[in-house]
Structures are given as structure tokens and as C-alpha cells.
Image (cartoon, rainbow, N blue to C red):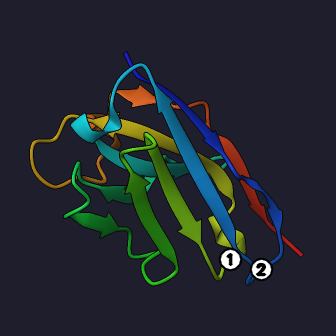
Amino acid sequence: QVQLVESGGGLVQPGGSLRLSCAASGDYLDSYSIGWFRQAPGKEREGASCISKSAASINYADSVKGRFTISRDNAKNMVYLQMNSLKPEDTAVYYCATARIPYGCALDWGRYGYWGQGTQVTVSS
């Protein structure tokens, strides 16, 4: 069983940056594709970005493309989401999650089994 803990959220002004971290324990992350998802109040959960086991495949939602960068350090069992040029509409609880996808990754949250507790990101002036 994998335990995931997100950190790095907070309050930031529009145009600012945050770096989210996802720390894993209980298993080796290099067995999993990893996704970052977000959910704003009153809205459905949506995929922001995902990365395959070897980092050879990365996907971004159109809404974050060019502003967010996902990365992973399998040696440290960590995954990161660098978020730049943040907008008020990026405000949400951000979650990392794992999926056993043999090749590539997916932004379909239904494919992900283990989830962290989430970290709040608020973009506001």
C-alpha cells in the first residue's frame, strides 16, 4: 500500500509560483504513473498533469499547459509540480495519486488508486 503526502500549497498572488511536492512511502514510486489532480469548490475533480513511470511520457491539461511542469525523482520517491504564472482559476485542493499504467500516463482520475490528502492552493490578490 502506498501512502502519499502532498505539501507546498499556500496563498499566492496572481502571476506567482508554487512548487508542490508529493512524498511517497510504503512502496517504490517507480512502479507507478503519477498524476496531479485538483478540485475547486463546487467543481468536479480534474487532472492537471501526469507522468509515466520512467518520466518518458508527460501530459498536461490544456488549462495548465505552458505554466505547470511535472517531474519525479524515483530515487527520492518524490514527485513535484512546479506551477508558474498562477491564475485565480488555479485555486483548488491539489492531490497526487498513483496508477499502475504499463506505458504512458492518463489524466483520468478513475484510473488512480492511491491518493494523498491534498494541499490547498489559493491564488488571490
Quarter of the rendering occupied by the C terminus? bottom right
At x 69% / y 66%, what residue is drawn? 18
Q: Quadrant of residue 124?
A: bottom right
Dot 2 amino acid type: Pro
- Is residue 99 shown above or below 79? above
Number of the label disc, if any, that sits on residue 50? none
Q: How many marks are shown on the rendered structure?
A: 2
Helix, strand or loop under label 2: loop
**54 with respect to 86 (left or right):** left
Locate residue 120 relative to residue 62 in the image: left or right.
right
Which quarter shows the N terminus?
A: top left
Measured from the top left, where is residue 25 in percent x and y? 47, 25
The x, y position of residue 27, in whole percent, is: 35, 23
42 relative to 14 in the view: left or right: left
Q: Name the residue: 77% across, 80% down.
A: 14
In terms of secondary structure, where does tag 1 sit? Answer: loop
Is 118 situated left or right of 120 in this image? Answer: left
* CA gap, disc 1 and disc 2: 5 Å
The reply to whether residue 52 is visible in this rendering is yes
Residue found farthest to the top: 1
Mark 1 residue crowding within 10 angstroms, few (<14) / some (14–19) / many (20+): some
Density class for disc 2 (Cα within 10 Å; few <14, some 14-19, many ≥20) is some
Circle 1 sits on which residue?
87
Labelled pair 1, 2 in contact (Cβ < 8 Å): yes
At horizontal 21% and vertical 54% (from top left) the residue drawn is 54
Amino acid type, label 1: Lys
Q: Is residue 17 above or below residue 108?
A: below
Front-most of residues 34 and 43? 34
Residue 95 image offset from top left, x and y in percent? 54, 43
Which residue lies under the disc numbered 2?
14
Q: Position of residue 87 (x, y in %)?
A: 68, 77
